[in-house]
């Protein structure tokens, strides 16, 4: 058996125990104190095998940087590994979705996205240390506290570390039960389109008013037409609000729109369309704000080479790896947009992320751990 895989399989019980500890340390994005407890947990776990530094996250928890102490001279630059400490589940979710180890799967808030992946990476570094396998690059793990809410406070830190790095590995879960790696991701953005009309009494003075709601309805129809499924571009008017009472012609209404674009050119085209919106009813005014908040992760030559390396290393263990594009964004979008080769989806394998059914598959933890260790040594 491949020595990397043999080590990981022998430590499977320990990996699962660490995942349980992490899951039971809840860390929702909106609770800085809870996230900081998780940061302290990981810092303690890595004591003695990594140099730890934390950074303020503003109203969010602290960001964690870990530079690992591994065999070898590490004189060939940095390898950045990205993860996040925050989850989408509110504090107390363990009461309704407790950690469970059942029928070969682990269940619980954040178990797949992404505490399972963090645990696998920690054991990958232990594998390299215990087997005394030399690593050519300085390995830096960056766990940010606000990924699930847009990475606003951590993006400068992520980009600064990426510019120092030869490659980036991202611990987001793989795609589907096949655990496909992610070599492309759509860019993600949000626009707010606000209409200002003129209020009037709907019964007494109907024609004196200019309905912001009617105008917005027409704008929403136009906005929805921006979707181009053949190009993978989706535009979703997802939240609408307007008016005050049924008997008042509405003087204000707005819509929040989610956009997904696989290529920069698509994102730029959408931006131009949004900011070119004009009122159908000239008595109304339109205000547009927002834009792209995660750039597209386009499959580059560097990403392709990283993926082919992962395929070869996985094959050594008898594991077949495929690739995928994701409609969701990650912090890998930021690093890939800088031109740094980025391989995403290297975390745990499972289903149901961001739902009460979130879980991972136990029998994929060992090969994921081994693959991460192999990549760290080979990149």
Image: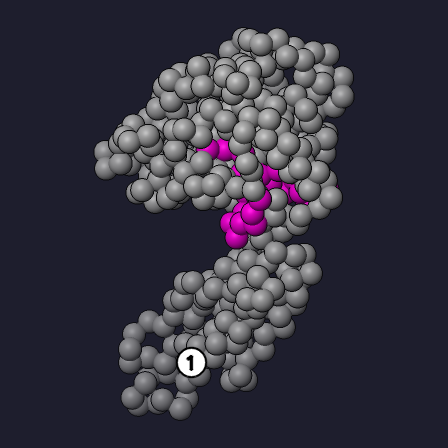
| Foreground of the two, 230 or 64 | 230
Q: In the rendered image, which quarter is residue 69 located in?
A: top right
Whether 325 is among the magenta residues is yes
Residue 309 left/right relative to 55: right
Q: Is residue 265 above or below residue 214?
A: above
Q: In the rendered image, which quarter is residue 376 located in?
A: top right
- According to the picture, the residue beneath numbered tag 1 turns out to be 214
Q: Residue 56: horizontal and vertical position, in percent?
A: 54, 29
Secondary structure found at label 1: helix
| Foreground of the two, 14 or 109 | 14
Could you tell me which residue is drawn at 55 percent across and 80 percent down? 279
Whether 53 is among the magenta residues is no
Instruction: State whether residue 76 appears in this view.
Output: yes
Q: Count of labels shown? A: 1
Could you tell me which residue is drawn at 35 percent across and 40 percent down? 358
Which colouring convention does the figure follow?
A: one colour
Q: Is residue 72 above or below residue 293?
A: above
Could you tell me which residue is drawn at 42 percent across and 24 percent down? 38
Q: Residue 110: horizontal and vertical position, in percent?
A: 39, 35
Q: Is residue 337 above or below residue 136?
A: below
Q: How many other residues sit within 10 Å of disc 1, few (<14), some (14-19) or many (≥20)?
A: some
Question: Which contiguous range is marked in magenta?
Answer: 323-348
Q: Residue 57: horizontal and vertical position, in percent?
A: 52, 32
| Foreground of the two, 314 or 21 | 314
Q: Quadrant of the C terminus?
A: top right
Q: In the rendered image, which quarter is residue 306 located in?
A: top right
Residue 375 left/right relative to 124: right
């Amino acid at each position: 058996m491949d020595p990397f895989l043999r080590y990981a399989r022998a430590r499977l019980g320990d990996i699962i125990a660490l995942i349980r500890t992490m899951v039971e340390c809840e860390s929702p994005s909106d609770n800085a104190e809870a996230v900081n407890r998780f940061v302290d947990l990981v810092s303690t776990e890595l004591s003695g095998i990594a140099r730890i530094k934390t950074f303020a996250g503003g109203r969010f928890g602290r960001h964690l940087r870990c530079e690992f102490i591994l065999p070898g001279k590490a004189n060939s630059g940095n390898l950045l590994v990205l993860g996040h400490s925050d989850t989408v589940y509110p504090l107390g979710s363990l009461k309704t979705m407790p950690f469970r180890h059942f029928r070969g799967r682990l269940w619980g808030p954040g178990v797949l996205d992404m505490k399972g992946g963090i645990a696998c990476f920690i054991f990958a570094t232990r594998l390299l240390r215990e087997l005394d396998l030399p690593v050519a690059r300085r390995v830096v793990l960056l766990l940010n506290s606000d990924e699930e809410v847009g990475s606003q406070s951590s993006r400068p830190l992520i980009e600064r570390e990426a510019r120092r790095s030869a490659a980036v590995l991202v611990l987001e879960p793989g795609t589907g039960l096949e655990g496909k790696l992610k070599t492309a991701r759509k860019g993600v953005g949000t626009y707010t389109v606000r209409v200002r009309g003129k209020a009037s009494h709907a019964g007494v003075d109907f024609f004196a008013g200019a309905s912001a709601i009617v105008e917005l309805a027409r704008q929403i129809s136009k906005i929805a037409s921006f979707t181009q499924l053949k190009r993978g571009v989706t535009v979703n008017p997802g939240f609408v609000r307007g008016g005050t009472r049924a008997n008042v012609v509405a003087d204000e209404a707005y819509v929040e729109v989610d956009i997904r674009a696989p290529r920069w050119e698509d994102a730029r085209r959408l931006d131009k369309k949004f900011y070119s919106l004009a009122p159908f009813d000239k008595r109304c005014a339109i205000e547009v704000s927002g834009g792209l908040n995660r750039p597209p992760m386009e499959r580059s030559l560097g990403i392709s080479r990283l993926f082919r390396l992962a395929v070869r290393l996985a094959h050594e263990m008898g594991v077949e790896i495929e690739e995928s594009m994701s409609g969701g964004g990650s912090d890998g979008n930021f690093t890939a947009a800088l031109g740094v080769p980025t391989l995403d989806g290297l975390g745990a394998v499972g289903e149901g992320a961001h739902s009460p059914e979130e879980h991972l598959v136990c029998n994929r933890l060992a090969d994921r751990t081994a693959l991460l260790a192999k990549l760290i040594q080979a990149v």
